[in-house]
Structures are given as structure tokens and as C-alpha cells.
Image (spheres, rainbow, N blue to C red):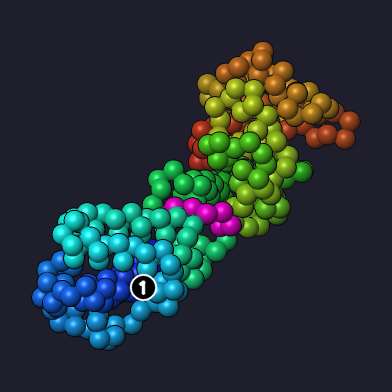
């Protein structure tokens, strides 16, 4: 694991400081004056201006950095800019390069797992898509551990398989819902989870969850299990509210109708139809809560 701050310290900072030190020296400042302005030692300034520090060629060739260095040097040398203002300008520039820009690219090269995220993101943004997707994946992993450690859960898996899904806060399609690729299956009495959670791999359970959310449910996660009348009674015994929908209609319409009648339902079920297996869908705020609810059925 490699932090973007390491990239800033190891790649950006030596390049930026050396460029700025050179520019300030060209403005006629002494090494001592440059050291005072940059808050570093004279020996460090000497290394910078004499090319004794390794610099990043891609940063050196970035015209925006060159323009920033020239502007900061002019302001500092002429007294129109304080070192505090120069620091703020540099910090703003760094944050800009971290948001899907050159520093983000250098960070991705230094930490290849980031390459799987195709969209630009700000690594420091607490509400970034990156952080949200990783939180959902983590929640699903916790929920899956609950199910894998629940003796007897395999007996609740329907013939079509189960899936534990969780949606991003602003999910508006299947690609915004993470799930188990290939579904959870009953293999000789044990629940088999074939892979790590991924987005966009569940059509059926994700569609039910999205339909429920579209109808006003605040659920973020769902898990499907085998239907029996006893299962519904057990869930009701846990204090959950159930609602039945028509299996032969499209999920969005059928689930919407069911929730229009029972808006606070946290369990949806259908009793089957032509070629359709009866299934129960347990809804909840996150994957772990849903998995814990189902564990009580065993």
C-alpha cells in the first residue's frame, strides 16, 4: 500500500523545490535568502541548485508547474508574496494534480490496484466514488463472512442460488450494485461464495433492491433465500414487515405495487409462477444487517 503523500514527498517536492530554488537564485537571491523563504537549510538549497537531487521528468515538463514556480519566485523575490501565501498556492496546486491529474497518475503507477478505477477521483475526498465503492465491497465481505460461518445457511439457498447485494448511496442502475459474481450456491451442504464482490454482476436480486428503492424503500442491501410459509412466519416473528409481490410481473412494477400497499416492508416475497421459483428477499440498511437477519432463520 502506497499513499499519495509519499508520491508528493518523493516525486513532487524535490522537483518543485529545486525548480523554485533555481528560479529564486536567478532572481538574484542568495542561498541563505532562498533557504529562509523555503524553510530549508542552505545545504539543501545548494543541492537543489546544483542538480544533486533527483527530479521527476514528467513534472519538470509540466507547463503548469513551470508557470506556478515562475509566479511564486516573482512574488517572493519582489516582496509582493509572503511565504505563507506561496505555500497555500503550492498546496492548492498539489490538490489539483491529485484529482485525476498528474499526481493521481503517478500514484496509480506506484500503487497499481488503483488502476481498476476508471473514473477520475480525489483520493482525499471523503465522499468520493472510490471510497463509497470500497465501503460497499467491505460491507459485503463482512456480510458474506456471516453467511459462510452460519451452519445451515446452505439449506436456505434456493435452486437458482442466493446473492447478497448492496447498492451505492445514489445507485440508479445494476452497475451501481455490488454482489457475488455467479451467486452463492449450495455445494454439498456448504455455502459456496465463488468470488470477491463486484459491481454490476447481479441482475436478479439487484433489480429487486433497485425496484424497492425506487418505490421509496431506504434499504441499501438485500439477500434472497428459499421461500416457505415458515420462513415468512419466522421473519415476522423477528418483528419484520412482509409484503408479497407478483412473480410474473416485472420487478419494478410488482415491487412498486407491493410497497404501495406496505410501504415499510423490509421483507418481500413471491410464491412462484410459471417457471418461476418462489423466493424471499430480505432488505436492510447494509449487507451485514441483512446477513445477520437471515442467520436467525437457521
User: Compared to 244, does 10 lie above or below?
Assistant: below
What segment is highlighted magenta in the picture?
117-123
In this rendering, position of residue 60 left or right of residue 221: left
Point 56% across, 57% down: residue: 117
User: Compared to 61, does 288 lie above or below?
Assistant: above
In this rendering, position of residue 8 left or right of residue 105: left
Instruction: Please count the marks in the image.
Output: 1
Point 37% across, 68% down: residue: 66
Residue 209 lies in quadrant:
top right
The residue where tag 1 is placed is 11
Point 62% across, 52% down: residue: 198
Residue 190 visible in this rendered orientation of the protein: no
Q: Is residue 122 magenta?
A: yes
Q: How many C-alpha atoms fall within 10 Å of the one at disc 1: few (<14), some, or many (≥20)?
A: some
* Nearer the observer, 79 or 237: 79
SS at badge 1: helix
Query: Quadrant of the image for the N terminus?
Result: bottom left
Amino acid at each position: 500500500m502506497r499513499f499519495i503523500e509519499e508520491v508528493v514527498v518523493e516525486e513532487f517536492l524535490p522537483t518543485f523545490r529545486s525548480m523554485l530554488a533555481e528560479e529564486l537564485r536567478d532572481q538574484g537571491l542568495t542561498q541563505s535568502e532562498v533557504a529562509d523563504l523555503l524553510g530549508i537549510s542552505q545545504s539543501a538549497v545548494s543541492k537543489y541548485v546544483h542538480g544533486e537531487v533527483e527530479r521527476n521528468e514528467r513534472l519538470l515538463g509540466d507547463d503548469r508547474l513551470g508557470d506556478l514556480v515562475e509566479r511564486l519566485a516573482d512574488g517572493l523575490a519582489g516582496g509582493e508574496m509572503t511565504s505563507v501565501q506561496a505555500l497555500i498556492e503550492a498546496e492548492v496546486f498539489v490538490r489539483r494534480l491529485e484529482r485525476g491529474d498528474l499526481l493521481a497518475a503517478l500514484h496509480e503507477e506506484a500503487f497499481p490496484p488503483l488502476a481498476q478505477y476508471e473514473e477520475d477521483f480525489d483520493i482525499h475526498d471523503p465522499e468520493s466514488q472510490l471510497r463509497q465503492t470500497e465501503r460497499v465491497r467491505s460491507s459485503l465481505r463482512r456480510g458474506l463472512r456471516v453467511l459462510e460461518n452460519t451452519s445451515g445457511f446452505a439449506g436456505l439457498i434456493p435452486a437458482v442460488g442466493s446473492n447478497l447485494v448492496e447498492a451505492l448511496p445514489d445507485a440508479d442502475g445494476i452497475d451501481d450494485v455490488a454482489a457475488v459474481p455467479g451467486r452463492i450456491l449450495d455445494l454439498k451442504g456448504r455455502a459456496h461464495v465463488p468470488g470477491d464482490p463486484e459491481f454490476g454482476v447481479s441482475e436478479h436480486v439487484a433489480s429487486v433492491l433497485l425496484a424497492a428503492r425506487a418505490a421509496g424503500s431506504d434499504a441499501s442491501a438485500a439477500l434472497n433465500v428459499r421461500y416457505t410459509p415458515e420462513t415468512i412466519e419466522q421473519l415476522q416473528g423477528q418483528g419484520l414487515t412482509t409484503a408479497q409481490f407478483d412473480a410474473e410481473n416485472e420487478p419494478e412494477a410488482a415491487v412498486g405495487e407491493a410497497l404501495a400497499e406496505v410501504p415499510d416492508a423490509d421483507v418481500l416475497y413471491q410464491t412462484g409462477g410459471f417457471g418461476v421459483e418462489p423466493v424471499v428477499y430480505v432488505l436492510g440498511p447494509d449487507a451485514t444487517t441483512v446477513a445477520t437477519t437471515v442467520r436467525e432463520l437457521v
